[in-house]
């Protein structure tokens, strides 16, 4: 016996990826429903060899459904997710709405799967920000060995993190550079993204950081350890899919780079590609479509007593969003619901 599963926001990039991954990983689905906003109502999406037609989120009855994977904005989630949870359908939410709620577990299964049991307080589980998810997969096994004091991270985040509009803007602006018949103004981003980098993701906060940077700090503390100090600079780059991060980690105890490399090789969800030669590292283009978080450029930081640098790359539509949500669903099924 399998599960009755709902995918909310099935016509977007992440929603479609959720459907792909549910099929790829052979998640035990008995019945599946795909929901969308009214403007996308009736749109067809693929689930394996099946074609599904989207239903209306506003009128959908969640009674009798086991779990729902949400890939819509915070406003729609705020309106409808409590209704699903109250009907007994566990909500796995990809928006930022519930991430910082103390009664909602924020989960990356490779890191804190045991937190899954906290779902029962609200019948809701939160999926972390895409940039946080891949980083904490790398941090956790190292933290278990040497205890992390401080993390300094600079991100290189692809435009798919801003949705289809972000990808379209990069595509249109890039074409306009080579065929300058018309100027394509920046709409989704604050400046032209083609052939450029923008050190600004989400809104600015009072202390000068952006909301994206604040998310990485708050979520790392909630998922891994509240004692870890984190400072982030988040940058949008002209890459379609795949987030990259340069991560500097300071530990309480000494950790040799060779031992760090071996720890990461053995850690779940990680693939180490780290050769000190031309091309002996992974770039975002190479990680697209893969489940793993790739780690390269592991080396000692000689400027602090116990420091390591590394390069972290992952497909943000997968590990940063859809894959992590499906892994949460798998953990929920295996540890709690036990139907599949």
Image (cartoon, grey):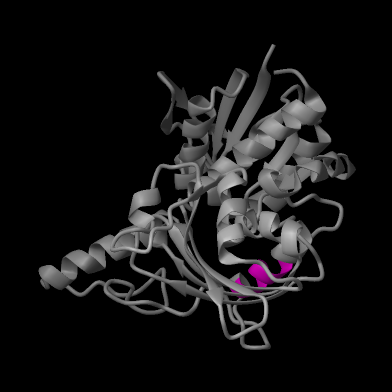
The residue closer to the viewer here, 223 or 87, is 223
Whole-percent x and y of residue 10? 51, 38
Query: Is residue 98 found inside the magenta-colored segment of the image?
Result: no
Would you identify the image quadrant in which residue 151 lies? Answer: bottom right
Would you identify the image quadrant in which residue 211 lies? Answer: bottom right
Can residue 71 be seen from the camera position used here? Answer: no
Can residue 183 be seen from the camera position used here? Answer: yes
Taking the spot 45% from the left edge, 31% from the top edge, the residue there is 42
The residue closer to the viewer here, 215 or 5, is 215
The residue closer to the viewer here, 10 or 207, is 207
On-image quarter of the N terminus? top right
Whole-percent x and y of residue 80? 70, 44
Whole-percent x and y of residue 46? 42, 27
Taking the spot 61% from the left edge, 82% from the top edge, the residue there is 209
Task: Please tell me whether residue 74 is drawn above or below residue 298 in the rendered image.
Answer: above
Mainly helix, strand or loop, the magenta region? helix
Task: Please tell me whether residue 221 is drawn above or below residue 15 in the rendered image.
Answer: below
Would you identify the image quadrant in which residue 31 lies? Answer: top right
Taking the spot 75% from the left edge, 42% from the top edge, the residue there is 113
Determine the residue located farthest toward the bottom in the rendered image.
Answer: 207
Query: Is residue 217 found inside the magenta-colored segment of the image?
Result: yes
Residue extent of the magenta highlight: 213-218
């Amino acid at each position: 016996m399998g599960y009755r599963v709902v995918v909310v926001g099935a016509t977007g990039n992440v929603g479609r990826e959720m459907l792909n991954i549910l099929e790829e990983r052979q998640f035990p689905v008995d019945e599946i429903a795909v929901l969308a906003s009214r403007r996308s109502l009736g749109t067809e999406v693929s689930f394996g060899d099946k074609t599904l037609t989207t239903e209306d989120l506003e009128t959908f009855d969640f009674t009798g459904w086991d779990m729902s994977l949400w890939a819509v904005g915070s406003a729609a989630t705020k309106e409808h997710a409590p209704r699903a949870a109250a009907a007994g359908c566990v909500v796995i939410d990809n928006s930022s709405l519930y991430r910082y709620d103390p009664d909602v577990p924020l989960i990356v299964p490779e890191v804190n799967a045991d937190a899954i049991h906290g779902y029962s307080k609200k019948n809701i589980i939160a999926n972390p920000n895409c940039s946080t998810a891949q980083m904490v997969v790398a941090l956790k096994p190292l933290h278990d060995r040497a205890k992390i004091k401080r993390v300094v991270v600079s991100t290189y985040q692809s435009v798919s993190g801003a949705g289809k509009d972000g990808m379209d803007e990069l595509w249109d602006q890039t074409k306009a550079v080579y065929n300058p018949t018309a100027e394509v103004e920046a709409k989704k981003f604050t400046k032209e993204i083609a052939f450029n980098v923008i050190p600004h993701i989400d809104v600015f906060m009072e202390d000068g950081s952006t909301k994206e940077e604040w998310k990485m700090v708050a979520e790392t503390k909630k998922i891994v350890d509240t004692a870890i100090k984190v400072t982030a600079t988040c940058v949008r780059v002209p890459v379609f899919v795949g987030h990259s991060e340069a991560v500097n980690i300071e530990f309480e105890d000494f950790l040799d780079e060779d031992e760090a490399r071996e720890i990461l090789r053995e850690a779940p969800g990680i693939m180490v590609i780290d050769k000190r030669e031309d091309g002996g590292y992974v770039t975002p283009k190479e990680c697209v479509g893969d489940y793993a978080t790739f780690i390269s450029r592991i080396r000692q930081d000689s400027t602090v007593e116990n420091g390591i640098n590394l390069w972290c790359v992952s497909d943000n539509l997968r590990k940063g969003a859809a894959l992590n949500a499906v892994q949460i669903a798998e953990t929920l099924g295996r540890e709690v619901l036990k139907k599949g």
